[in-house]
Image: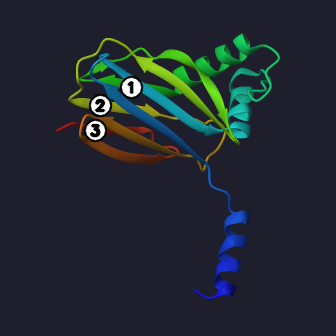
Amino acid sequence: MTLIKIVILYFWMLMHPYYLSVTELKYKAKEKTMAVSCKMFTNDLEDAIKRSSGKTTDLLNPKDKKEADKQLAEYISKRLKISIDGKLCSLKYLGYEKEEDCIWTYLEIEKIAKPKNLKIETSLLYDYLKEQINIVHVEIDAFKESSKVSNPDSKMEFKIH
């Protein structure tokens, strides 16, 4: 690729931003839990929380960490649904951490046997961005698979073999 094409591609990418979140699910056999983590761009997440709740939040420098945790937990619990072997699971919110311009949110599903079937419905940031894409990675023992949905699609299924 010529230098001119590289420069044009670089500027095109700057002019056409992408809107992406990543959710990772990893089964921990020893603990019989599913670790769930969600990575979203901080500014998009803060704007989505404001639009959905009417409350402004600063996740990078929260004045009230408990309130920020509460808003984040509420936002995610309404937009991320996980069913394991036909049963809708309860997500336990553990907390979040900052990573450059993103927020990693950590959740957990407790006391579950090794899943055979996962159904995931994710509409994270859909109420904020019509161009939103959500990617989900699943890891259960040797099974590793990924899928993506683009707004307005929100459902995916993983059959573990």
Q: CA distance from mark 2 to mark 1?
A: 7 Å
Please indicate whether residue 133 sits to the left or right of residue 59 in the image.
left
Q: Look at 52% across and 35% down and name the residue there.
A: 123
The C terminus, quarter of image: top left
Q: Is residue 41 above or below residue 105?
A: below
Q: Nearer the viewer, residue 57 or 39?
A: 39
Q: Where on the picture, by quarter, is residue 3?
A: bottom right
Q: Are marks 3 and 2 in contact (CB under 8 Å)?
A: yes
Query: Where residue 71 is drawn, which disc sits there?
Result: none
Please indicate whether residue 34 sits to the left or right of residue 114 in the image.
right
Label 3 CA crowd tier, 10 Å (few <14, some 14–19, many 20+): some
- Residue at the disc numbered 1: 82
Q: Nearer the viewer, residue 128 or 103?
A: 103
Q: Position of residue 158 (x, y in %)?
A: 28, 38
Query: Mark 2 or mark 1, which has the lower sequence index?
Result: 1
Q: Are marks 2 and 1 in contact (CB under 8 Å)?
A: yes
Label 2 CA crowd tier, 10 Å (few <14, some 14–19, many 20+): some
- Residue at the disc numbered 2: 118
> For the residue marked with disc 2, what is the amino acid?
Leu
Q: Where on the picture, by quarter, is residue 99?
A: top right
Q: Position of residue 134 (x, y in %)?
A: 50, 43
Query: Where residue 158 is drawn, which disc sits there?
Result: 3
